[in-house]
Amino acid sequence: MEGGVDYLADERKKAEFDVQQMKIVWAGSHHTFEISDRISKLVANDPAFSKDERTMLPRKELFKNTLRKASYAWKRINDLHLSEEEASQLRFYVDEPAFTDLHWGMFIPAIKGQGTDEQQKKWLPLAYKMQIIGCYAQTELGHGSNVQGLETTATFDPQTDEFVIHSPTLTSSKWWPGGLGKVSTHGVVYARLITDGQEHGIHGFIVQLRRLEDHRPLPGIIIGDIGMKFGNGAYNTMDNGVLRFDHVRIPRDQMLMRVSQVTRDGKVVQSDVPRQLVYGTMVYVRQTIVQDASCALSRAVCIATRYSAVRRQFGSHNGGPETQVIDYKTQQSRLFPLLASAYAFRFVGEWLKWLYTDVTQRLQANDFSTLPEAHACTAGLKSLTTSVTADGIEECRKLCGGHGYLCTSGLPELFAVYVPACTYEGDNIVLMLQVARILMKTVSQLGSGKLPVGTMAYMGRIEHLLQYRCNVQKAEDWLNPAIVLEAFEARAARMSVSCAKKLSKFANPEEGFAELSADLVEAVVAHCQLIVVSKFIEKLQQDIPGKGVKQQLKVLCGVYYLFLLHKHQGDFLATSCVTPKQASLANDQLRVLYSQVRPNAIALVDAFNYTDHFLGSILGRYDGNVYPKLYEAAWKDPLNDSVVPDGYHQYIRPLLKQQRSAKL
Ligand SMILES: CCCCCCCC/C=C\CCCCCC(=O)SCCNC(=O)CCNC(=O)[C@H](O)C(C)(C)COP(=O)(O)OP(=O)(O)OC[C@H]1O[C@@H](n2cnc3c(N)ncnc32)[C@H](O)[C@@H]1OP(=O)(O)O
Ligand SMILES: Cc1cc2nc3c(=O)[nH]c(=O)nc-3n(C[C@H](O)[C@H](O)[C@H](O)COP(=O)(O)OP(=O)(O)OC[C@H]3O[C@@H](n4cnc5c(N)ncnc54)[C@H](O)[C@@H]3O)c2cc1C
């Protein structure tokens, strides 16, 4: 803090709860708090990880700088003998998208999830030591969402016991994989398996792309970066790549063979694991993306909340200070639901991580029963949380007024880095439609005696939910979690049943599904919101120590669900889950909760425990010393290097001269 002055000190004194305990709740445990606190400070205090000039660097310099940081980070990880968990926290706090994200986040998980024990033994040690660097090369120029439509071929040649990897068309060029453009030596490449003239669907293959000696592409491989992306700095630190194969040969044992094997004589043998495991890496990453959503949203909310307490406009009485913009009810009604959503996503992310771990353990024991639930939850929650987060970051920018538009606010870059999360790892609408299929299947099986499980279990009480009447009579009734859960369950169930009824009127179900897809997406949103609300409520049933901590979380949970109820009151009214009077009472209660959040708002964002380095925002500085720092930063812009700009003599002077002579 500059000169030890904390301009937000008065705000911090207002807190009605133990912030240190809330930090532990946010982190998930004492252990994770200790690691993230120590590692974030380690990164923040190391000038080699500075981010100050990132948005001003030309692409080549920006990229080289990312390589420098990634290599330095790797050195620190080794020098300090960091554990896997600490190393991953270090990469997180370096806060710069890089090839390492895909190496650790997709290449290694793909080999772990789809490789046989033998393949894992061969490739993982090399990858763990970064003696090879890998990417996840699935998407092509012509197809991303439709994985079955990929065109790259892997044709088995029994003569040589090899696969021939080939890009038969321009549209079969791999396009987008992160780390591919300039760095990766290897890729898990997804291709259409062909043996003996027959197609056997999409499979993953480990393919070496560049020579380890001089980094040049191997024969038959064309490889490069796909070009600048949205925003300054932002995701341009990543070398998203293009890749073409001209009959590139790899040994047979480089097909990832956990799901299917190709024998020496070219026979395809299916294991007893489901084919969908080929998509397993995507399930894993979607789960991490939900956790990442709470990080990105909390970061934007932290900036907007602190700045809203610093910023004053209007309302001065007798020469006194003007009103802090955070005290405007409209500001609160835009900001506090996002604050509550950040907490909600944190807890649902925690739960999803548990679900994923559980599914993985079951898969190892050949129990595949929970795979559809894992697919539905990761797909649906990835879509819901990334959409809300992307919109939320932009809302936070607006909440910061004009200064939010400056790169030094940190918000434009955060938005630009974050917004592709709505597209990568599955376009949000495409994924919602996957969940819609599962929902419709669940509804259609309701009469069959097969009870729905997991997050769909509420559908098992369909009779009751279709007859349900909400019995809220006064505003405080909306603080009763049981009432809220039933209202959300009834809304989700009724929307699904309504879609299923309409669907049954179509002779061709696929045509019906396409025709009703917009309604189906709305039903999926209702279902996923129910999951988030229910996991928040479950969290509150745990023992949460610390003065006032649980109470604050109750308030935030209330803000989260009552805001959703208010925003989607059309759904709740149209499905007769609430009456107009009850919806109005919900909104009354929401306003009460906003006023309870207000004194705690700064402490609630302090609980994220973000360093100023990580936040990367003058508006979000911990000490609230915004104006002098904004003023200082302006002078550091390269445009201010000279008083008279380059180009003056060429363009401005002749213009001014011409106007003067015209006047004369
Ligand atoms: C703090 C943590 C920090 C970490 C931060 C992480 C952030 C990372 C940051 C940056 C990294 C960015 C990485 C981005 C990488 C990528 O984008 S990789 C490419 C991702 N591509 C996609 O996601 C493609 C999306 N498309 C698909 O997933 C599928 O093609 C499809 C599901 C849309 C359709 O597939 P299709 O084969 O046509 O399937 P269907 O016929 O519809 O379904 C057949 C059955 O399979 C079930 N199913 C589908 N997918 C899965 C799955 N993933 N898992 C399990 N099961 C699945 C589906 O329900 C059907 O089941 P039934 O037969 O029972 O009906
Ligand atoms: C920053 C970034 C990083 C990426 N990294 C990687 C990577 O490392 N490896 C990799 O393999 N890929 C990567 N990708 C690719 C990414 O996974 C795909 O772009 C993504 O899956 C979306 O597919 P698409 O581009 O084919 O979109 P499209 O499917 O072409 O989507 C276009 C539009 O069509 C709509 N649409 C498509 N199908 C349907 C349907 N059935 N019903 C209704 N609407 C539909 C979509 O909603 C969307 O509005 C990355 C992408 C980005 C942006």
Image (cartoon, rainbow, N blue to C red):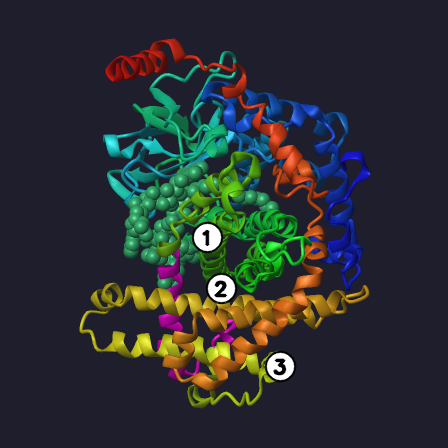
Magenta stretch, overall SS: helix
How far apart are the alpha carbons under marks 1 and 3? Answer: 29 Å
Q: Residues within 10 Å of mark 1 (few under 14, many from 20)?
A: some
The residue that label 1 is drawn on is 391
Q: Quick check: 447 left or right of 631?
A: left
Which label number is shown at residue 480?
Answer: 3
Cα separation between marks 1 and 2: 27 Å
Front-lying residue, 186 or 585: 585
SS type, badge 2: helix
Residue at the image position 28 percent from the left and 34 percent from the top? 172
Residue 373, numbered circle: 2
Q: Pick out the residue farthest to the top.
A: 649
User: Residue drawn at (26%, 17%), measured in percent from left and top?
Assistant: 663
Residue 495 on image: x %, y %: 37, 76
Q: Quadrant of ligand 2?
A: top left
- The residue carrying pointer 2 sits among few (fewer than 14), some (14 to 19) or many (20 or more) residues within 10 Å by Cα, namely some
Answer above or below: position of 378 versus 484.
Answer: above
Q: Which mark is residue 534?
A: none
Q: Quadrant of residue 18?
A: bottom right
Q: Is residue 436 in the magenta section?
A: yes
Q: Is mark 2 within 8 Å of ligand 1?
A: no
Q: Name the amino acid type tagged 3.
A: Asn
Place of residue 30 in the rendered image (x, y in percent of width and height, measured from the top left): 79, 53
Q: Is label 1 in a helix, a strand or a loop? A: helix
User: Do the numbered discs 1 and 2 sit on residues whose CB atoms are within 8 Å?
Assistant: no
Q: Earlier in the sequence, mark 1 or mark 2?
A: 2
Query: Seen in the image, is 638 located left or right of residue 85?
Result: left
Q: Quarter holding the N terminus?
A: top right
In percent of width and height, residue 80 lies at: 77, 29
Name, please, the residue furthest toward the front.
Answer: 664
Looking at the rendering, the stretch of residues picked out in magenta corresponds to 431-458
Residue shown at 35%/24% (left/top)?
Answer: 248
